[in-house]
Image: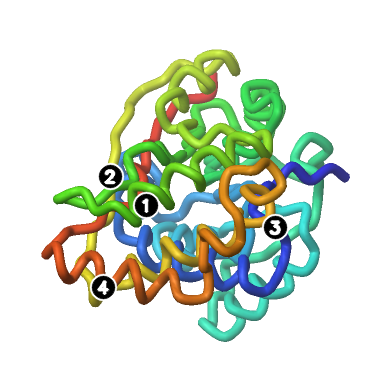
Amino acid sequence: MTDEYVMGRNTAETERLRVQGDIFAEHSAHLFRLAGIAPGMRVLDVGCGAGDVSRLLSGIVGPAGSVLGVDVDAAVLDVAATRADEAGLSNVSFMQADLRELRLDEPVDALAGRLILMHLPEPAETVRALSHHVRPGGMVTFQECVLSRCRSVPPTPLLTKTAQWVFEAVRSGGADPDTGDRVSSILTAAGLPVRGIAAAGAGGLADSAMPGYFAATARSVLPLAVAHGLVSEAEAAIDDLEGRLAEEFRAAEATAWTADLVAAWAEVA
């Protein structure tokens, strides 16, 4: 199995994924429904991580549908399975597999993923291979971020600086931080006719989850940033970054915005 995930594999990153899932939940659900995910569907969720998208999809497809979450990381799948059990979701299951070597017993109605293509060295080829698991007339949809759109209004110096080295760290690690800008072209390159494209974003004030989410994301990529000389641990001052961001947003009466979340969807011939 191969693992190109640049954010790190640890408890802190799993918790960051949980917070991210909460922040993007309603926006992702809206984009999935626009793409055509509907009650009764059997959905394959690739790169499922801690299971946030799988749980979200389970609510959309309902008890008549099912969701299979796939990830390469066994530890995070344990977390995903536990959370699904605790939520009483009987229509969700998980499988450990390399996406390029995935084998299924029967086709699904839809293939979905969120913030996974950015971590793949050959996303179009991977999507092409995964789309073979979708029945004719089924659909494929992916949601990816445009990290350069992370900002505050009005602009605040600390967030601007932090977002810049986070962006560069992700890119230095081999991932594309602005994959959302080309998610539709990835589906096209995979041989899939794109039927729609849409975007959503989440915002918040100083007392929202935004300062903590930004700080957690910075923490996850800090080892990469330090290794590539983008910031020092002293400059990042990661342990009090959340508080400093909140203070900055409060003083400026700023609204903080996450990266844009861009979705594209296509139909399988």
Identify the residue at image location x=40%, y=26%: 181
Report if residue 92 is visible in the image. Answer: yes
Q: Which residue is mark 1?
A: 28
Q: In the rendering, which numbered label is found on residue 247?
A: 4
Label 1 CA crowd tier, 10 Å (few <14, some 14–19, many 20+): many
In the rendered image, the quadrant that contains the C terminus is: top right
Whole-angstrom CA distance, mark 2 to mark 1, is 8 Å
- Asked if the residues shown at circle 2 and circle 1 are in contact, with their CB atoms under 8 angstroms apart, the answer is yes
The foreground one among 50 and 37 is 50
Labels 4 and 1: the sequence-earlier one: 1
Q: Secondary structure at mark 3?
A: loop
Residue at position x 71%, y 68% from top? 10
Q: Secondary structure at mark 4?
A: helix
Above or below, 195 relative to 250 = above
Question: Label 2 crowding class (10 Å Cα cut-off): few <14, some 14-19, many 20+?
Answer: some
> In this rendering, which labeled residue sits more in front, label 4 or label 3?
4
Q: Left or right: 238 with respect to 133?
A: left
Q: Nearer the viewer, mark 4 or mark 1?
A: 4
Where does the N terminus fall, quadrant-wise? top right
| Residue 122 versus residue 164 in the image, above or below | above
Q: Position of residue 219 (x, y in %)?
A: 57, 63
Mark 2 = which residue? 200
Name the N-terminal-most of marks 2 and 4.
2
The amino acid type found where label 2 is placed reads Ala
The x and y percentages for residue 114 are 51, 46
Q: Which residue is mark 3?
A: 8
Q: Earlier in the sequence, mark 4 or mark 3?
A: 3
Which residue is outermost to the front?
A: 234
Q: Nearer the viewer, residue 229 or 65?
A: 229
**In the image, residue 229 above or below residue 234:** above
Amino acid at dot 1:
Ser
Residue at image point 23% right, 71% down: 206
